[in-house]
Image (cartoon, rainbow, N blue to C red):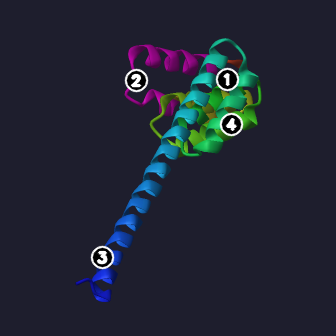
């Protein structure tokens, strides 16, 4: 014979099972949305990199900004943004992007290079050389080290930086 307490017991089990399924579904949808968002971020950074490679720096800036809107903790997007702003001669913006990149990833060699170039372009040789010197202290490939060494030499030999040393 079926009693009310027995029905209630099975009803609670069914409801708890349904609730568990719902929670699992919500988590799965959340993970799926997060993965899709990450794919969009990666696509925006890739588009920015490709645009910059082809010389379309305004387009690159737009792509990096879109990536940053989706993931404000992505150092590579700030690095690309700093590079593009330097090429566009928007040195204040390049310096801001470089500093944010360094804040997120202090070992990002390229961010230090972009920071040094932006500072140099603003006329502060001492700080520019310090940024490049910082990059030179990182464990870089010989090609990267050669790039930094040439940059330091160029900065120190320029009229603007006469007499400044690291």
Q: Nearer the viewer, residue 129 or 32?
A: 32
**To which quarter of the image does residue 112 belong?**
top right
Residue 154, located in which quarter of the rendered image?
top right
Decide if residue 60 is on the left or right side of residue 142: right
How many angstroms separate mark 2 from mark 3 (CA)? 66 Å
Q: Residue drawn 52% across and 34% down? A: 39
Instruction: Find out whether the residues at labels 2 and 3 contact each other: C-beta distance under 8 Å.
Output: no
User: Which one is earlier in the sequence, the residue at label 4 or at label 1?
Assistant: 4
Residue carrying label 3: 10
Q: Residue furthest front?
A: 1
- Badge 2 element: loop
Which of the two labelled residues, at mark 1 and mark 3, occupies the earlier sequence position?
3
Magenta span covers which residues? 133-155
Q: Which residue is label 1 attached to?
A: 162
**Front position in the image: 40 or 111:** 40
Closest to the camera, between mark 2 and mark 1, is: 2
The residue drawn where x is 55% and y is 40% is 37
Residue tagged 4:
65
Relative vertical location of residue 15 with respect to residue 7 in this rendering, above or below: above
Residue corresponding to mark 2: 140
Residue 12 image position (x, y, % from top left): 34, 77
């Amino acid at each position: 014979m079926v009693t009310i307490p027995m029905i209630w017991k099975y009803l609670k089990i069914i409801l708890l099972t349904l609730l568990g399924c719902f929670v699992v579904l919500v988590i799965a949808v959340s993970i799926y949305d997060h993965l899709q968002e990450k794919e969009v971020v990666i696509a925006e950074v890739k588009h920015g990199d490709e645009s910059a490679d082809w010389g379309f720096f305004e387009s690159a800036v737009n792509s990096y900004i879109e990536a940053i809107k989706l993931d404000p903790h992505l150092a590579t997007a700030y690095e690309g943004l700093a590079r593009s702003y330097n090429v566009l001669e928007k040195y204040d913006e390049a310096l801001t992007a470089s500093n944010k990149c360094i804040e997120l990833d202090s070992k990002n060699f390229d961010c230090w290079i972009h920071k040094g170039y932006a500072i140099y372009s603003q006329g502060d040789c001492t700080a520019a050389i310090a940024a490049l010197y910082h990059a030179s202290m990182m464990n870089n490939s010989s090609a990267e080290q050669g790039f930094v060494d040439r940059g330091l030499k160029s900065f120190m030999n320029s009229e603007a930086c006469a007499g400044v040393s690291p």
